[in-house]
Image: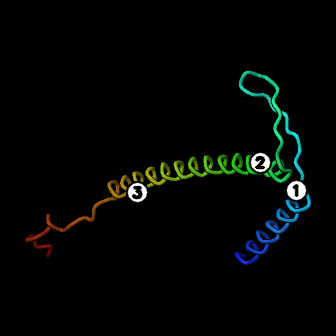
Amino acid sequence: MSVIKFIIAILFLIAIAAFAVVNRHSVEVYYYDLQLAKQMIEAPMIIVGLVPFIMGFLLAWSFTVVSQVKSKAAIGKRNRTIAGLEQDVERLKPTPKTSESTVGVDRN
């Protein structure tokens, strides 16, 4: 399975490289700065294409990390609950009856 992932990653990198080579020209990108004034920069097409992709990747990754942290916290809480319940079960188990009260008593 890891070989398939590696091959897909290599193909993806080749596609990005081909995109970069074909689209080497600069494009004008307009944006608003903090004072809400319209600004313009010239950037290579590959940058204009990759920046939103990387931002989306980071956003999706952050949601995944938050979900994993929540899941691990829930699992830890449930494990503590299980451990407490197992202690309760052990505490509530009937103790084996010993024959100390019948020691020295002749039953015949």
Q: Provide the residue designation for mark 2.
A: 51
- Is 53 in front, or is 35? 35
Q: Earlier in the sequence, mark 2 or mark 1?
A: 1
Compared across the picture, whether 102 is left or right of 33 comes to left
Q: Amino acid at mark 2?
A: Val
Q: CA distance from mark 2 to mark 1?
A: 15 Å
Compared across the picture, whether 75 is left or right of 95 comes to right
- Is 16 in front, or is 37? 37
Name the residue located 81 percent from the left edge and 66 percent from the top edge: 12
Name the residue located 48 percent from the left edge and 48 percent from the top edge: 77
Q: Earlier in the sequence, mark 1 or mark 3?
A: 1
Residue 108 location, x and y as percent? 14, 76
Q: Provide the residue designation for mark 3.
A: 86
* Quadrant occupied by the N terminus: bottom right
Which of the 4 image quadrants contains residue 103?
Answer: bottom left
Residue 9 location, x and y as percent? 76, 69
Residue 86 location, x and y as percent? 40, 57
- Is 4 in front, or is 88? 4
Mark 2 and mark 1 in contact? Answer it, CB < 8 Å. Answer: no
Q: CA distance from mark 2 to mark 3?
A: 52 Å
Mark 2 and mark 3 in contact? Answer it, CB < 8 Å. Answer: no
Disc 2, SS: helix
Q: Provide the residue designation for mark 1.
A: 24
Circle 1 or circle 3, nearest the eye: 1
Residue 75 location, x and y as percent? 53, 53
* Residue placed furthest toward the right: 22
Circle 2 or circle 1, nearest the eye: 1
Number of numbered discs present?
3
Compared across the picture, whether 10 is left or right of 84 comes to right
Disc 1, SS: loop
Q: Residues within 10 Å of mark 3 (few under 14, many from 20)?
A: few
* Residue placed furthest toward the left: 104
